[in-house]
Amino acid sequence: MTQKLSSKGLSGQGLQRRPRRATLLSFQPPAVGEEEIAAVSETLRSGWLTTGPRAAELERRFAEYLEADHVLAVASGTAALHLSLLAIGVGPGDEVITSPITWPATANVIVHAGATPVFADVREADLNLDPDAVAALVTPRTKAILPVHLAGQPCDLEPLWALDLPVVEDAAHAAESRYRGRKLGGLSDATCFSLYATKNIAAGEGGLIATNRADVAAAVESLRLMRRGDGSLYDIVVPGYKANLSDVLAAIALVQLGKVERHAEIRARHVALYDEAVAELEGIEPLARDPRDTHALHLYVVRIRAEGAGATRDSYQRALAEEKIGTSIHFLPVHLLTAYRERFPDQAPLPVAERGGAEVLSLPLSPAHSDDDVADAIDALLRVHARFTA
C-alpha cells in the first residue's frame, strides 16, 4: 500500500495555493435556477397549489425513472418512512432493526409507529449496516429491517433479503444509486426518498415512496390523506394523516428530476478532485464506494483519524469554519442521542458506529458549487492538515 504523505510534503507537486475565501462556502446549497422559478410561477398561476396534477406527474415520472410499479408523493422523507412502516403492518410490540448512523428521523418513525428501534452495528468501510450484526439481532418480535444507504452508497441488501423479513429502505441519499446494477425503488417492500433542500432532487420539502407491492401502495394511498369521498359528502375509512405533497413543491421536483444527469456529472467531477487531494493526506480517508454499485454521490464523507491527521474531527471542523468552509457531520450515532440513550439505557455498545460517528466529516458537495469553490475547500483542508501535522 502506498504510504500517505503529510500535507507538508505536497508543496512542489503542482498544487496551486489559493488565498483564504472572503465569504463562507455553504456546505450544500440547492442548485435551483430560472427553470424552478418559472415552474413555481406557472403552478401558482394555475390556481392549484395543493396536491394535484403536478404531484401526479411527479409520481409517474419518478416511477419511470426508477423502473418501479408504484410511486407515491408525500410531505417529507420522514413521512415516507413512517407511512411505509405502517403500510407493512409495523405496530406496538414489534421491533425494527436499523442503523445508528443516520438522521434521527429513521429511528423516530419506528417509535411513532409504536415499535422499538433495534440498532445494529455498521461496517467499517462504508458505515452501512453490517448484515451479520443484523442477523444476530433478529427475534420473533422483529417485524422489519430498515437499512440506510449512507451518503449514496447502497447498503448490501441481498443478505438482508435472505432473512425473509420485510425491508423498507431509507434512500434519502440515494435517488440515483444502483445496487448491483439495479435501480433502487422496486427491489424491497418499500423504498423511501427525500426531496429536502439539500438532497440530489431538491424541492425544499417532500418525499417519495416507491414499491412494486400493490398492497403497500394502496395502504399508503389510504394513509397519506385522510379525506375520502366526493365533494362535501366524505367518509373516513382509515384514520390517516395529512402527509400529501403540494403541487408547488412537486413542480420544483419535476424540474430537478430533469437535471439529475447534469448534476450527477458535476458531483462526479468534484468527487474526483476531492479523491485526488485526500489520497495524499495522512489520517484522512473517504468512506468506501463499492465498485459493484452506483453511488449517488450525495455526500463526500471523510473519516478523520486523530493519530494520523494530528487532530480530532471536531478540531478540523472548527478550523475549516475559520477558513470559511462549511462542513457537516453525517452522522452522530442515534443510540447516543439523549432521547434514545434515556429511552433504551440497556443498549449494547456499537463500537464501529461509535468510532465512525466521532470521525466523520462531510465536505462541501453540491452542483451549485463551482470547480473554484471545491478548489477553495481542498486548499483550506490542505492548510488545516499542514498546521495540525506540523
Image (cartoon, rainbow, N blue to C red):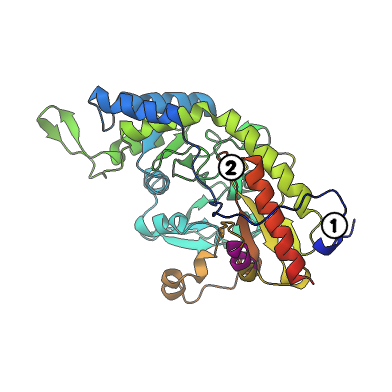
Picture coordinates of residue 208 (x, y %)? 43, 37
Q: Secondary structure at mark 2?
A: loop
Q: Earlier in the sequence, mark 2 or mark 1?
A: 1
Q: Is residue 232 above or below residue 94?
A: above
CA distance for labels 2 and 1: 26 Å
Mark 1 is surrounded, within 10 Å at the Cα level, by few (under 14), some (14 to 19) or many (20 or more) other residues, namely few
Q: Considering the whole magenta stretch, tell me its main secondary structure.
A: helix
For residue 180, side relative to residue 100 (left or right): right
Image: 242 above or below 115: above
Where residue 255 sits in the image (x, y, percent)?
45, 28
**Residue 254 has which mark?**
none
Query: Residue drawn 74% across and 64% down?
Result: 385
Residue at disc 1, secondary structure: loop
- Name the foreground residue: 370 vs 1: 370
Q: Horizontal placement of 269 versus 338: left or right? A: right
Residue at x 54% of width, y 45% of height: 173
Amino acid bearing label 1: Ser
Q: Quadrant of residue 361?
A: bottom right
Pair 2/1: label in front: 1
Instruction: Identify the residue position indicated by label 2 in the image.
Output: 369
Circle 1 is placed at which residue position? 11
> Which quarter shows the C terminus?
bottom right
Q: Taking the image as drawn, is residue 70 in sight?
A: no
Residue 44 placed where, x, y %? 27, 28
Q: Residue at x 54, y 65 (%)?
A: 333
Instruction: Reply yes or no: does residue 317 show up in magenta.
Output: yes
| Quadrant of residue 315 within the rendered picture | bottom right
**Res 23 visible:** yes
Q: Amino acid at mark 2?
A: His
Question: Magenta segment, which residues?
Answer: 316-322
Q: Residue at x 49, y 59 (%)?
A: 140
Q: Please tell me which residue lies in front, 171 or 133.
A: 171
